[in-house]
Amino acid sequence: QVQLVESGGGLVQAGGSLRLSCAVSGIVFSRYAMAWYRQAPGNEPELVARISNGGFTTYADSVKGRFIISRDNRKNTVYLQMNSLKPEDTAVYSCNARQLVPPSDYWGQGTQVTVSS
């Protein structure tokens, strides 16, 4: 059974920091690209950051320079360090594991991040 379990969300003041974690089990973690998505009420899901199985990272323009995605293949965990948080970062953050060959795609249940002004 594949599980992606996010943690680390919560309420923080603008300018603060949070670190999200996503613990993965049931797959060969090192073979998967990992990503964080977020969705605010009334908005479409947005890709926040992605890290390839080789460690290559990409970020949404809205979070570049503030967020850092990383992975620990020994712990089967992906992280999202979020700094200089803004109220517009408020959303449910979900992690995603994706492999192209063979194609497979898994999601966590999400964790709420709320940034107060």
Image (cartoon, rainbow, N blue to C red):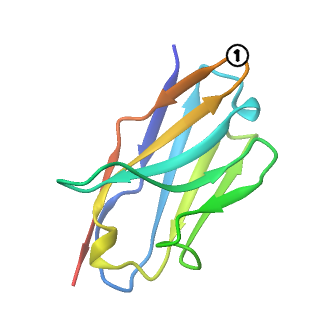
Q: Residue at x 49, y 25 (%)?
A: 3
Residue type pointed to by label 1: Pro
Residue 33 appears at what percent x and percent y? 67, 39
Residue 89 appears at what percent x and percent y? 34, 69
Q: Identify whether 112 is placed above or below 77.
A: below
Q: Residue at x 57, y 74 (%)?
A: 64
Residue 41 appears at what percent x and percent y? 18, 54
Q: Identify whether 112 is placed above or below 76.
A: below
Secondary structure of residue under mark 1: loop
Q: Nearer the viewer, residue 88 or 22?
A: 88
Q: Quarter of the image holding residue 99?
A: top right
Residue 13 appears at what percent x and percent y? 28, 81
> Which residue is situated farthest in the right direction here?
54
Q: Residue at x 31, y 83 (%)?
A: 14
Residue 13 lies left or right of residue 69; in this view the side is left
Q: Identify whether 49 is placed above or below 77.
A: below
Residue 113 visible to an observer of this rendering:
no
Q: Residue at x 35, y 48 (%)?
A: 45
In the rendered image, which quarter contains the C terminus? bottom left
Residue 58 lies left or right of residue 16; in this view the side is right
- Please give the residue where the numbered disc 1 appears in the rendered image: 102
Residue 60 visible to an observer of this rendering:
yes
Question: What crowding class fits label 1: few (fewer than 14 Cα within 10 Å), some (14-19), or many (20 or more)?
Answer: few
Residue 97 lies left or right of residue 109; in this view the side is right
